Image: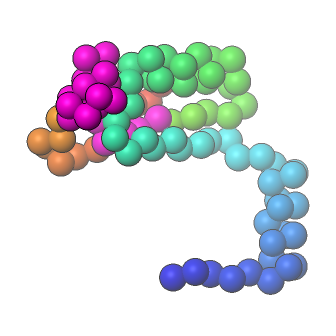
């Protein structure tokens, strides 16, 4: 389903964020995230206290799993069927 907005609605939405930019952003990576990405997000959050990034993904991959997934070896395990969220403050 696609929602269409009028020009006035779009302009009002844009004006809202010019006055008050978002204070949180959620980054969800399908296929999994790595500890290095979590560290980068933690560093970002430390340097930018006005905006917090929350990192999530279908799995948390270590280096071997990441390289296996890149090579098509399917190194990531999704047996639990759940999702992972890391709050890196």
The answer to whether residue 60 is seen in the rendering is no
In this rendering, is residue 84 above or below 4? above
Q: Residue at x 31, y 22 (%)?
A: 67
Asked if residue 85 lies left or right of residue 14, the reply is left
Asked if residue 81 lies left or right of residue 62, the reply is left
Residue toward you, 20 or 5:
5
Q: Which percent across, then down, holds residue 25?
A: 59, 43
Q: Is residue 65 magenta?
A: yes
Please say which color scheme the image uses.
rainbow
Residue toward you, 62 or 55:
62
What number of labels is visible?
Answer: 0
Q: Is residue 69 magenta?
A: yes
Q: Which percent across, then down, holds residue 44?
A: 62, 22
Residue toward you, 56 or 49:
56
Question: Magenta residues?
Answer: 55-76
Q: Residue at x 44, y 30 (%)?
A: 87
Give the image quarter of residue 8: bottom right
């Amino acid at each position: 389903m696609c929602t269409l907005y009028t020009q006035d609605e779009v302009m009002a939405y844009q004006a809202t964020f010019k006055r008050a930019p978002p204070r949180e952003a959620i980054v969800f990576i399908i296929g999994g995230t790595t500890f290095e990405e979590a560290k980068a997000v933690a560093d970002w959050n430390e340097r930018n206290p006005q905006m917090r990034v929350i990192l999530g993904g279908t799995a948390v991959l270590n280096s071997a799993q990441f390289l296996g997934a890149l090579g098509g070896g399917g190194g990531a395990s999704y047996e639990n069927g759940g999702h992972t969220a890391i709050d890196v403050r």
